């Protein structure tokens, strides 16, 4: 059995999708309709992943791995030569985990209350300002740097790229006007593995 990534086009499953392609691993893609919780063949997605969300990665032994920030580290560790993550147990690895956790909890999940139709305009404004401040932290870290880790492109950059796509959709000017985040976004987007992932998901 080969690796299988359960994904939804443009969702946060794009991050492990990028990691799988950057690592050069063989894998299958299975599309999930998140609204209907169904696979393309009509199968119940909850039967695959009881959590009901993407990403989920079926491993070669049949186990299911969930949580994007963890899946990308598993993928990186399958191909250490691809240098998508520093060695497990090193402080550099903990720094990567620090970024992945920040991206997951502050950037990725920071969009939820802004996009939630039940949020009042005041709440949306509060969460929008907070999210902008969090993206400033990302921008500050990327000043004079190509990628988040000194070692070069890592799985954290693939995940950060996904959150910047969300920012671009929410407020294109916020990304375009950032002298740091705009070129970083283009730099990641130009990577062959990222372009291949976007094309496979039918995205631009
Ligand atoms: N804790 C999960 C959250 C993943 C997540 O938010 N997935 C979204 C797509 S970006 C989803 O599938 N949402 C559907 C739902 O929650 O029902 C992770 O970090 O991987």
Image: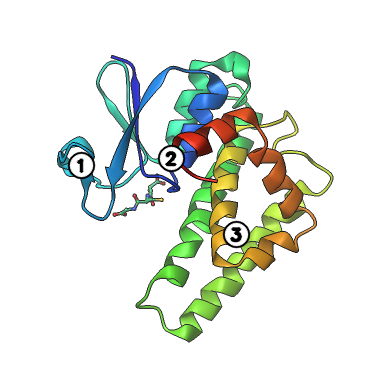
Please provide percent x and percent y for residue 182: 73, 53
The image shows residue 163 at horizontal and vertical percentages of: 55, 52
User: What kind of element bears circle 2?
Assistant: helix
- Dot 2 or dot 3: first in sequence order is 2
Mark 3, secondary structure of its residue? helix
Whole-number angstrom distance, CA of label 2 to CA of label 3: 21 Å
Q: Quadrant of the N terminus?
A: top left
Read off the residue under disc 3. Answer: 168
Residue beneath disc 2: 68
Element type at mark 1: helix
Q: Are marks 3 and 1 in contact (CB under 8 Å)?
A: no
Dot 2 or dot 1, earlier in sequence? 1
**What is the crowding at mark 1: few (fewer than 14 residues within 10 Å), some, or many (at least 20)?**
many
Q: Is residue 132 above or below residue 125?
A: above
Q: Quadrant of residue 22?
A: top right
Q: Is residue 184 left or right of residue 68?
A: right
- Determine crowd level at label 2: few under 14, some 14-19, many 20+ residues with C-alpha closer than 10 A: many
Residue 43: give x, y in percent of width and height. Answer: 15, 38
State how the image is colored.
rainbow
CA–CA distance between discs 2 and 1?
A: 17 Å
- Which residue occupies 47% across, 80% down? 123
CB of mark 2 near ligand 1 (< 8 Å): yes
Q: Give how far apart the Cα atoms at labels 3 and 1 are.
A: 29 Å
The residue carrying mark 1 is: 45
Determine contact: label 2, label 3, CB under 8 Å.
Answer: no
| Residue in view at x 72 percent, y 46 percent | 184
> How many labels, in total?
3
Left or right, residue 99 beside residue 31: right
Q: Quadrant of residue 130?
A: bottom right
Task: Report if residue 22 is visible in the image.
Answer: yes
Which of the two discs, 2 and 1, sits closer to the camera? 1
- Side of 111 relative to 175 (left or right): left
């Amino acid at each position: 059995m080969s690796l299988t990534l359960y994904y939804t086009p443009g969702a946060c499953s794009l991050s492990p999708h990028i990691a799988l392609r950057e690592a050069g691993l063989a894998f299958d893609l299975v599309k999930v309709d998140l609204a209907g919780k169904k696979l393309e063949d009509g199968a119940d997605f909850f039967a695959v992943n009881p959590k009901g969300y993407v990403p989920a990665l079926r491993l070669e032994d049949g186990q299911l791995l969930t949580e994007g920030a963890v899946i990308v580290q598993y993928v990186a560790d399958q191909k250490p030569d691809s240098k998508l993550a520093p060695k497990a147990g090193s402080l550099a690895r903990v720094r990567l985990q620090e970024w992945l956790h920040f991206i997951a909890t502050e950037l990725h999940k920071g969009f939820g209350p802004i996009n939630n139709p039940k949020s009042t305009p005041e709440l949306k404004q509060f969460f929008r300002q907070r999210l902008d401040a969090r993206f400033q932290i990302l921008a500050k870290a990327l000043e004079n740097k190509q990628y988040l880790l000194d070692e070069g492109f890592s799985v954290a950059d693939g995940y950060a790229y996904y959150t910047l796509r969300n920012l671009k959709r929410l407020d294109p000017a916020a990304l375009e006007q950032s002298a740091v985040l705009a070129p970083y976004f283009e730099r990641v987007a130009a990577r062959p593995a990222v372009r291949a992932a976007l094309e496979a998901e039918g995205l631009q």
